[in-house]
Amino acid sequence: MGVFFSNNLTREPLVFKIPTENFFYHLPGEVEDFCKQISDNKHFIYEADLSNNTYTEEALELILNSLEECCNLTIVRLRKILYEWMTEFEKILEMVCRFLQTIQNLEELDLSDNCLKPQALDIFTLCLERSPNIKAIRLNNDNLGAIGAKKIFESLKKIDNLKLFVFAGENNCFEDEGTIVLASLFGKLKTLRKICLSENEIGQLGILALSESICKNPNLQVLKLRDNHINEKPSYLSLSSAFKRLRFLSFIDLGDCLLGNKGSKAIIKSLMISNENLRQLYIQYNEIDENELSDIIVSFIIKRKTLEVINLTGNDINPESIEHLWKELRKADREFTIILTDNSESSISDIDCYYYEERVDGITYEKSETIKNK
C-alpha cells in the first residue's frame, strides 16, 4: 500500500493522498508508512486528502501529527470520514479542528459528506473563525440545516478582510431561513467566484435574498442552484435581473427548479443580452413545452457563440427547432453539445466537455469526457 504523490521526482509541490478508499484504519501500524512518506516530503506537500476512509482516533492522530510538520500545506480534503455511528465522533472532530488550526495558511477546506451533528457544529465553526486565509469552503451533504448556516455566518463574519472565493453547501436543507443568512454574508464578501447551493429546498424568500447578494459579487463565475424552487414570478425575475449584471458567469445550473415556460423564458431572455462568457447552461427538468420557447432557446444558442453545452433533458423541446439548430451550427462549423436525455448526448462533432472546478487562482477547465457525434 502506497501513497499517491504528484511530481514526486521533480520535487515540485506534492499532493498527499490516502490511496485506498472505504478502508477502516484501526491500528497505528496500518498508517506508519503514510507518516513516513509525509515526514520525508514535509517541505513539498501543499495538499492533503484523507477522504473516503474511516480512522480510529489513534490512527488519525498519527497522520495529523505528521501533517502538522508540512509548513506549506494550504489545502485539506476530509470528505466522508465521519459517521453518526462512530463512538469517537466528537473526539475525532475535535482532533481534526485542532489540526486545522495549526495550518498557518489554510486556503481550501473540504469537509463534504460528513455528518456534522448540532454538537459538532460548534467545534467546527470555532475552527473556521480561526482560519483567516480561507479561500474555499466545501460543506456539501453535511446535514447542516438552517442552524448550521447561521453558525457558519457567525464564524466567518468574525474574520477581518475575508476573501472567500468558493462556497459549496449543496444538499444541506438550508431552506429560506438558512439561505437568507448566507446571502447576507455573500453580499458583504463581494469576492465570491463560485456558489453551490443545489438541493437546499430554497423558496422565494431565499432566492430573492440570494439574487440581491450575488449582484454584489461581480466576479461570480459558477452558480449551481439545481433542485430548488424558482417557480414564483418574483424569484425568476430577480434571478434574471441578477444575471444581467454578472458578466463573468460561465456555468449556470438551474435544473429541476420548476421554472416552467415563463420562468425559463425570463432566464433565457436575460442571458440573451448579457453574459458573453457563458459556456454551460443546465435547465433540465423545468417543464418546458412551448414551441415558441423552443425557438427562443435555439435563437439564444445561435447568438451566444461562447456557449458550449446546454442540458435540456426532461423538457418537451420541439424536434423541428432542434433540427434547425443543427443546420445552423453545421453551417457555422461550430462545436456544441446538446444534452436531451439522461443516457445520451447529441453533438455536432466530437467535443471535449468540461466541468468547472474553482481553484484559488480562478477557474480551471478539467476534461470530464468526450462526447461522440451521434
Image (spheres, rainbow, N blue to C red):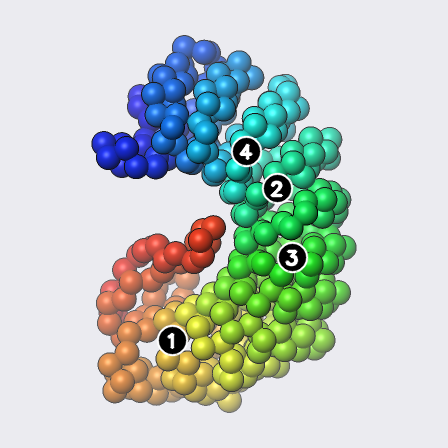
Q: Which three-letter amino acid code belongs to the residue tagged 2? A: Pro
In primary-sequence order, the first of circles 3 and 1 is 3
> How many numbered marks are there?
4
Q: Nearer the viewer, mark 4 or mark 3?
A: 4
Question: Residue 306, labelled with which disc?
Answer: 1
Q: Tell whether label 2 touches label 4 (CB within 8 Å).
A: no
In primary-sequence order, the first of circles 1 and 2 is 2
| Residue named by callout 2 | 132
323 left or right of 57 in image:
left
Gap in angstroms between the C-alphas marked 4 and 3: 22 Å
Q: Tell whether label 3 touches label 4 (CB within 8 Å).
A: no
Q: Which three-letter amino acid code belongs to the residue tagged 3? A: Leu
| Residue named by callout 4 | 104
Question: Residue 189, labelled with which disc?
Answer: 3
In primary-sequence order, the first of circles 1 and 4 is 4
Residue located at (25% from left, 87% from top) = 331
Q: Tell whether label 3 touches label 2 (CB within 8 Å).
A: no
